[in-house]
Amino acid sequence: RMEASLFWDHFFLSDAQLSRLRAHHGEEVAFYFAFCDLSNRALLPVAMVGPVVLAVRNIARSSGSRVYAVLEPFYAAALVLWGTYLLMLWRRRRAELQVAWGVEHFEGRSFERPQFHCWHNASTGEPRYYPEWRRTAKRAMSLLATLLQTVLLIFLTILIYLHYVNAVEYYTGIQKTLIASALNGLMYGLIIMGLELLLFGAISRVLTEFENYRTQSEFESAYVFKMFFFVWVDGYLWYWILGLVHIPIVREHSGPDGRIDPAFARQTTIFGWRVFNEGTTTVDQWIHSFETSVTFQVAGSNTLILALENLLPVLWVWWVRSRWNAHIRRARRSLNWPLLRRVIPTAGRGGANGKGAGGTGGACEAAVWDTLLQLREVLWEGNRAPYDVFWDMYDAVLYLGYVSVLSLQQPLFPLIVFINNMIEIRTDLTKIGTCQRPLPRTTKDLGEWEGCLWFQNFLAVLQVSLFIVFSTEALETVWFTDSSNPHYFVDGRLTVYVRLSVAFGFCVLLLGAIFVIRNTMGELPRDAGLQRLRRMRLHSTLRDRRLSRTRSAHSVNIGLASVKEKAA
């Protein structure tokens, strides 16, 4: 409770609070909270800019201005580069904490897992051996199972997407908002982000166990990579379908008024379900619906995940503990437990004065109850589920990727993520109190998740580039305005070749900017470098003093020995 109050009383975390977390729960938990705190600090200015960008977009659309269409690519590029800047800031912050906590040279030990099934190699005499061809075969089988799960994910996402398309095409007004946006967002959050994620997590752990890794570090790395693959596909699949498939198809087969061709609409079906209605929703309306779906789905999934991961466990533990405490209070009043009747045979029943063979009955009862309460706390701690930062890191990685990619469609998304993260970083520590106390683990970084963050940042470049050229009207509104130009347009539509060429050029520029940021920002801040240099000098000085003292003691011992020889 004291630790949780630190988070509610302060807007951001200080070094002293992170050091206290490290002292209580180890470097692994402390590095997670340090990363979340740094991301919240970096998110604050982006979250403040979001409402301004949204206001500019609405004003530009209502007035027919091209201002937002001109600024949209620059805003998207700034968000991607913000993600790179955040990761470089984390490198510097991580270096500071490594120096402050003395783990900059830490190398984790890889212990052999008890579940590792080994063979004995008779030819070499090596007792712990497992043939590489068997592990390769098991990895191939795991890959096949992962791909089958991905196919199931795509199938479920398409079903929910067809429900969304049907609601957008056939409903209007408040019904369209409630069914297409709110209800569909809850379905997506519950089925895809909730149930399918739990199923994939359980199967991925079984597959990783099946691959029979020797050390715990190898097991955790393989499991993290499997889950990150699912997180990345699961988190963006809906937006790929709508922004990179649906909207380009509507644009390619629409007439001059922006409405889809009736003949094409009648022919396009999935599982017998017509995808498009004849002549109802235009290209601009689908682009606006893309922006609306981002808001409702992300907000719905955020709320659902926050409740499932933080609120429900706390309420469940509070309810169980309250029932436990009530049961103990009733047992203490009536002494109706068989165990207590054996442990306290005379307490409260040792005669008129309440005395028994063991002395004063009240004192005996109080001592036994103190022991029982301590035993209750031990049992309570042991029966709780263990705490793991894995699922919390999953949320942090996914939502930071959303900020770089989906803020192009909904400028308020950084503000939504900032509010969610500020609540979750406070509830996470409360959640630690509802689980088993985590075993402190010494680490010097976030582990495999750091590689996942950089991988996500580079893929954000590709996603943002494709969303700009296919899911917005920026090219036709600003850069390619002459629809009669045969080099760029065919039948009044901008060709796919031109769009892909612009996306490629945009990717090259963004990758060049990322390269510049990575090479101009030092990984080690000046203060941390000076502190590390002072520590190295201090260690060198102490070593020299220790050697000099050892030499002096050795010379004294030699002198004493020579004196004794002369005296003898």
Image (cartoon, rainbow, N blue to C red):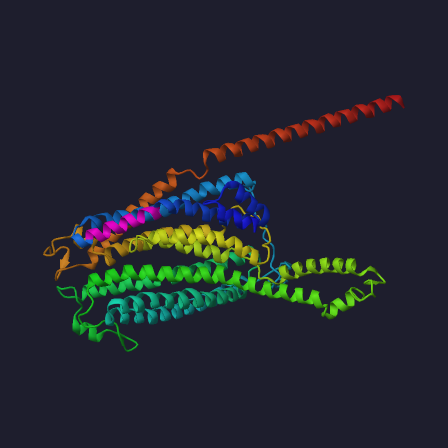
Which residue is nearer to you in this view: 421 or 119? 421
**Residue 140 appears in view:** no
Q: Which residues are magenta?
A: 46-60
Q: Position of residue 148 (x, y in %)?
A: 42, 70
Position of residue 423 in the picture relative to residue 74 (left or right): right
Q: Residue at point 23% right, 73% down?
A: 268
Q: Position of residue 376 (x, y in %)?
A: 67, 61
Location of residue 241 with respect to 45 vertically, above or below: below
Name the one closer to the observer, 237 or 13.
Answer: 13
For image coordinates 76% across by 68% down, the residue present is 341
Residue 82 visible in the displayed image = yes
* Magenta region includes residue 149: no
Q: Could you tell me residue 398's position as x and y percent?
A: 41, 56
Question: Residue 347 location, x and y as percent?
Answer: 78, 64
Q: What secondary structure is the magenta-colored segment mainly?
A: helix
- Kindly give the residue lying farthest to the left in the view shown: 484
Q: Image point 25% across, 58% down: which residue? A: 471
Residue 54 belongs to the span the image colors magenta: yes
